Image: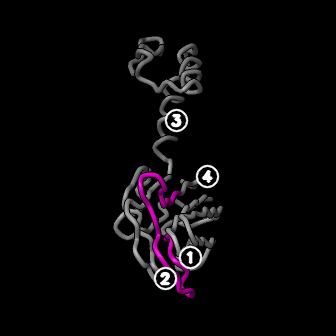
Amino acid sequence: MNLNQNDTAVTPNQSLPSDPSILSLKDSLISKPHGKRVAIRTMTTVMADVVAFYVYLTNTETNPGPHHVIVYDHVVTNSGNGYNKHSGAFTVPKAGMYVFSWTTFVDQNSYFPIELAVNSHRAGIVFVHASTTFNGVTGSVVIQLQQDDVVMVRSEPGYNPSGNIYSDNKMKTTFSGWCISCSN
């Protein structure tokens, strides 16, 4: 974006997203002769500081046992680079209050307790069972975390599950997390 001698923006509208709230903010910034540079830089900085990820499993995991970490191999979003698709772990890049959600599908004749673990300790758990058809369950947790804490989804260590963790293009086994209040 270029500014003329009066600090008035001269960049065409196409350079910013078309979201109405962003355009409204952009229009109010352009109409005010002072402070535009600071406000626009702040908006860019806020977006750069976002910590969020969304990943899913592309294939069914056959007969995983107890204490099995689910390694979600397809990364859709990984802002902050906290998720590792090789280990299935999210390493907290910034301390703060986080929300995590995980959805697990199983196929016929399967049952699993699936837990969210933080530094190897249970932070949340769900149970999914399917007898004659596929079934799924979603869990969510809101939790305060410190930088370098490690979060993962796994089958519960003290329980012997049965069957398969299912995922395909119609039913995705997913894991996501985002910081709702991160420290700098």
Q: Nearer the viewer, mark 1 or mark 3?
A: 1
Give me the C-alpha separation between circle 2 and circle 3. Answer: 43 Å
Quick one: 131 or 156, which is closer to the camera? 131
Dot 2 amino acid type? His
Residue 18 showing in the rendered view: yes
Q: Vertically, is 160 above or below 100? A: below
Q: Vertically, is 129 above or below 44? A: below
Q: Which residue is mark 1?
A: 111
Q: Vertically, is 114 above or below 22? A: below
Q: Earlier in the sequence, mark 1 or mark 3?
A: 3
Residue 149 showing in the rendered view: no
Q: Judging from the image, what secondary structure is the residue with disc 4 in?
A: strand
Left or right: 84, with 118 as reference point: left
Q: Give how far across and how far down residue 90 sits, in percent.
A: 46, 65
Q: Which residue is mark 4?
A: 180
- Which scheme is used to colour this image of the protein? one colour
Residue 124 sits in which quadrant? bottom right
Left or right: 33, with 77 as reference point: right
Q: Give how far across and how far down residue 68 sits, in percent.
A: 45, 79
Q: Give how far across and how far down residue 159 sits, in percent.
A: 56, 86
Give me the C-alpha separation between circle 1 and circle 3. Answer: 48 Å
161 falls in the magenta region: yes
Mark 4 residue crowding within 10 angstroms, few (<14) / some (14–19) / many (20+): few
Magenta residue span:
150-176
Q: Give how far across and how far down residue 76 sits, in percent.
A: 41, 50
Give me the C-alpha separation between circle 3 and circle 4. Answer: 18 Å
